Amino acid sequence: MVKFVNRKTGKNLTPMFDQYLRYRDLPTLELEFREADGTVSYRWKADVKECAMPARVGRRGDWQIVQPTAEWNTMKSGLKKDEFEVATDLYYVGVSKQ
């Protein structure tokens, strides 16, 4: 089935399937806020290191789509930690804010 989905989407979704089907823990989107700089750093914490899927973040109704990986990436954000959201209604993931 995974090969079929990969072929139809043109993307390698095998790592994502592996994470959800072979491991108990959900992938967790880790967020680190530097409010003085107006930045947020983000990455996936997952058992499958290649597990990389997009996520909608920011403010509901004005989402930004980010492409987290296992490595830290940084984005500009004018939102504070308590205002910054992840569209968890669209993704079955954990969220960790630091």
Image: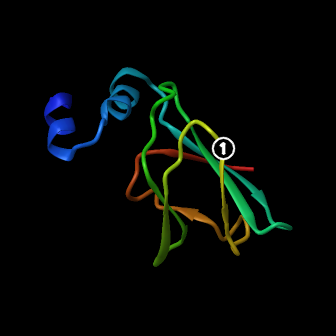
Residue at 42 percent of width and 45 percent of height: 53
- Seen as rendered, the residue at the extreme bottom is 61
Instruction: Return the x and y of residue 92 as percentages of the image width and height.
Output: 41, 46
Left or right? Give the position of 93 relative to 16: right
- Seen as rendered, the residue at the extreme front is 10
Q: Is residue 9 above or below residue 26?
A: below
Q: Is residue 24 above or below residue 63?
A: above
- Asked where in the image residue 76 lies, by quadrant, the reply is bottom right
Q: How is the image coloured?
A: rainbow
Residue at 86 percent of width and 67 percent of height: 36
Under tag 1, what secondary structure? loop
Residue at 33 percent of width and 26 percent of height: 21
Q: Quadrant of the N terminus?
A: top left
Residue at 60 percent of width and 44 percent of height: 43
Q: Residues within 10 Å of mark 1 (few under 14, many from 20)?
A: some
93 or 53, nearer to the observer = 53
